[in-house]
């Protein structure tokens, strides 16, 4: 999720997908709809775009390697693609920086949250924690099993940390009368920095092995 644009046109706080499609493409491409509410995407520095591409390229390599030895699944690595919530309708969606989803039945088909195995966001230094947590919660409520967060170094053109979160769908133990704010939540299941000599090694939802040399600026 990149950093905010300097200027945003004056739009209603709520739109339908049909209304969004009538906007100029350069404006519509900057918007997500959260249950119809307009949420502005954020355009980031060049590092954001480069590291988004690095992560997508690495994941695509891992997906292709896995599928070459397994005929059980058909998956695709993708980037900056709308993920729609619910089985129908298009006025509730988010746009992750990178993702892995099941192969779709026909060309140009919409990607639904139920098709998605993994989503990821590249977090630039200017992103706020509240913005990231809000979007992470959307992914969790949508039932997406794995969430990746790529933290950029504020002092260098480099990735500082990669964290992997797994979806927890059962309530943890809380005091009587206390309920969680969201019905699903992510738990950190892996973390890597440039000091890890073997790079990123993770076995879910398919074997993932990414040396740091693939993620350099």
Image: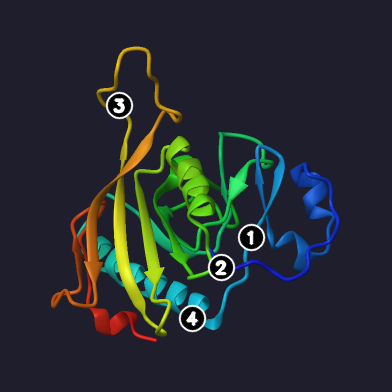
Q: Nearer the viewer, residue 71 or 41?
A: 41
C-alpha separation, residue under disc 2 versus residue under disc 3: 32 Å
Going from N to C along the chain, the mark reached first, 4 or 3, is: 4
Q: Earlier in the sequence, mark 2 or mark 4?
A: 2
Residue under the point 66% across and 37% down: 35
Disc 1 element: loop
**Toward the viewer: 81 or 4?**
4
**What quarter of the picture does the C terminus occupy?**
bottom left
Q: Are marks 1 and 2 in contact (CB under 8 Å)?
A: yes
Q: Badge 3 is on which residue? A: 170
Residue 187 image point, x, y percent = 29, 44
Q: Secondary structure at mark 4?
A: helix
Real-space CA distance between mark 3 and mark 1, rounded to the nearest whole angstrom: 31 Å
* Residue name at image x 31 percent, y 65 percent: 162
Residue 40, position in %: x, y?
68, 57
Q: Which mark is residue 41?
A: 1
Q: Earlier in the sequence, mark 3 or mark 1?
A: 1
- Residue that sits furthest to the top in the current view: 177
Q: Which mark is residue 47?
A: 4
Q: Is residue 105 among the parts visible in the rendering?
A: no
The residue pinned by badge 2 equals 2
- The span from disc 4 to disc 1 (Cα, nearest Å) is 16 Å
Q: Nearer the viewer, residue 171 or 18?
A: 171
Q: Secondary structure at mark 2?
A: loop
């Amino acid at each position: 999720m990149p950093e905010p644009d300097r200027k945003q046109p004056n739009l209603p706080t709520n739109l339908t997908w049909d209304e969004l499609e009538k906007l100029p493409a350069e404006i519509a491409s900057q918007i997500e709809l959260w249950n119809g509410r307009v949420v502005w995407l954020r355009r980031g520095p060049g590092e954001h775009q480069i590291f988004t591409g690095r992560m997508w390229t690495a994941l695509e390599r891992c997906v292709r390697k896995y599928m070459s030895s397994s005929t059980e699944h058909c998956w695709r690595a993708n980037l900056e693609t709308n993920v729609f919530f619910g089985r129908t309708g298009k006025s509730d969606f988010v746009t992750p920086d990178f993702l892995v989803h099941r192969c779709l039945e026909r060309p140009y088909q919409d990607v639904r949250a139920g098709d998605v195995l993994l989503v990821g966001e590249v977090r630039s230094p200017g992103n706020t924690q509240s913005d990231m947590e809000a979007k992470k919660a959307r992914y969790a409520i949508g039932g997406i099993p794995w969430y990746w967060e790529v933290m950029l170094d504020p002092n260098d053109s480099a990735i500082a940390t990669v964290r992997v979160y797994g979806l927890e769908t059962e309530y943890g133990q809380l005091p009587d009368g206390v309920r969680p704010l969201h019905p699903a939540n992510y738990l950190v299941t892996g973390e890597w920095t440039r000091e890890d000599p073997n790079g990123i090694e993770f076995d879910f939802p398919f074997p993932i092995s990414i040396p740091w040399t693939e993620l350099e600026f």
